[in-house]
Amino acid sequence: MSRSTRFDTKKVNSELVTLTYGTLVAQMVKDLENPDDVSKQLDRIGYNMGIRLIEDYLSKTGSGRCLDLKDTADKIQTAFRMYLGVQPNVVNWSPAGDEFSFSLDSNPLTELVELPDDLKQLKYCNIICGAIRGALEMVQLDVQSWVVQDQLKGDPNTEIRVKFIRRLEDAMPAGED
Amino acid sequence: MVIYCIYIVSKSGGLIFNYDHNVPKVENERKFTYPLDIRLNYENKKVSVHFGQRDGINVGHVLTAVNGMPVTGRQLDDGRDAKDVLESKESYPLTLKFSRPKMTTNEKIFLASMFYPLFAIASQLSPEPKCSGIEVLKGDTFKLHCFQTLTGVKIMTVVDRNQIGAEVFLKRVYELYADYALKNPFYSLEMPIRCELFDTNLKAMLEQIDKSGIASI
Amino acid sequence: MTVHNIYIFDRMGTLLYYQDWNRLKNSGMTKEEEAKLMYGMLFSLKSFVNKISPTDPKEGFLYYKTSKYTLHFLETPSGLKFVLNTDNHSQGVRDFLQQIYKEIFVEYVVKNPLCNLNEPIQSELFKTKLDAYVKQSSVFLTKSM
């Protein structure tokens, strides 16, 4: 019935994904010239993916609404495993519990990638930040997300920070109070 | 047998009787250090949990006590504003008590009048002809049974989600209503039921159910 | 057992999809008016359920039952609302709705880049898949009486 049998995650070669993504970013670097614009576009693409991906996630896991950021962190962790095949650690909680990081030992998007020196400010993995932001916005959580450390820039691991801003009460589905 | 509460709504949609039999109190106390790891909302003259539920303190719960001192609205009993206390670092550690807000009588009246159109629309939107209104409404934490008499009075009860036999109970409440409210010459129709005999008999019946189950009535 | 009809709303209250299978009575208004009334009712029901609940609800409103039909409700955390009307004897309809969400809606609407998520669904593929999915389900069996 479902197409997931044809699109089995196990059957898609992960290097194909890495390669596709790499080519896309490289093409954008060529087209846009300014690396900051590329980072911005990547974030936007991620956002557009996130707002659709969330439905896939919700329907497959049957999970309910998050009412605590720890819940949210756990669920995104699961999503990383589902969609990228890696399990990040949730680390560096802020004392008020409104900020945390995902730390990835390996990142399928950046395997095989070397950043040239003139692109050091490019946020190659910004698509992940965008996806997190987009997905959470659809479940009425306004967050900021950015890359703190990047293996591409010589850091020991990739760290993605997520900061809770507020619950989007206006966008709350009706009757939810 | 868990019966949480009983409502009677008149033909015109006004709440004429309600009784809370067994409403569980949801209350939690916890010690907090600075900075506070839950987000609070200070709007609408109360302090409520906005995000970050844990240890039974859920989103929507309101602050009822600080270090054992009751809080009314936003104000502590000694006159201080709750927000000032919670936001100053010096006052920590703090023991805060939160509880699920209790329904006020006004809210109950509001809910009763809200159910009235829902009942009617459910019948209007029916895919089958000659359909009644809502008879059972189920949420994940409770079940509401509604029995509408031929005269249009609605008797409702909120019970445990797995409770069976609530229909029988509603019929019995109807009998009590007929006996002790309607047959009382000083009770005027459509007005709130303030009849002692009705109350005592209803309570006696509820006790009987608590003791030996719904089959005993 | 019988399936009467299905409504799918987005989180802003737009009717994304409607289909009926065994509907014997019409509400006597246009589809748009009916959708508005349905959405309004769901809106109020949810708020009603959350307020009257004796303890903290998680999923809130699940279904209601009248003398003739049962309305089953599923809302996703992203605010999509699935409503399925069946007869009063159907079992496991909520799971069935979750399956429709997962197997049909996500697969043929969300993953279809040409489908706009805030507009009524035009996709023929979705329509045929949903129809087939409902018809082969255990909940769907034409009335024997």
Image (cartoon, rainbow, N blue to C red):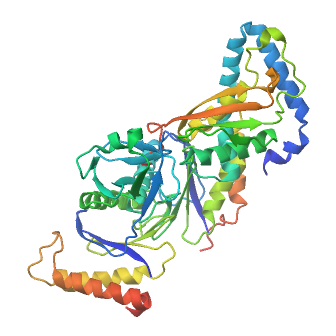
Q: Compared with residue A17, is residue A77 higher up or lower down, i.e. above or below? A: below
Where residue B68 appears, as percent x and y from the top left, is 34, 58
Locate residue C17 relative to residue C56 in the image: left or right: right
Residue B206, quarter of picture: bottom left
Residue at image point 27% right, 60% down: B104
Taking the view exactly as shown, the residue that stands out farthest to the front is: B90
Total labels: the figure holds 0
Locate residue B81 relative to residue B183 in the image: left or right: right
Where residue B203 appears, as percent x and y from the top left, is 28, 84
Taking the view exactly as shown, the residue that stands out farthest to the left is: B186
Q: Nearer the viewer, residue B38 or A67?
A: B38
Residue A161, quarter of picture: top right
Residue C136, quarter of picture: bottom right
Residue at image point 61% right, 63% down: C93
Where residue B161 appears, as percent x and y from the top left, is 49, 72
Q: Compared with residue A143, is residue B202 higher up or lower down, i.e. above or below? A: below
Taking the view exactly as shown, the residue that stands out farthest to the top is: A33
Locate residue C2 relative to residue C136 in the image: left or right: left
For the question of whether residue A7 can be seen, the reply is yes
Residue at image point 73% right, 14% down: A121
Locate residue A111 relative to residue C66 in the image: left or right: right
Where residue B89 appears, as percent x and y from the top left, is 42, 39
For the question of whether residue B155 can be seen, the reply is no
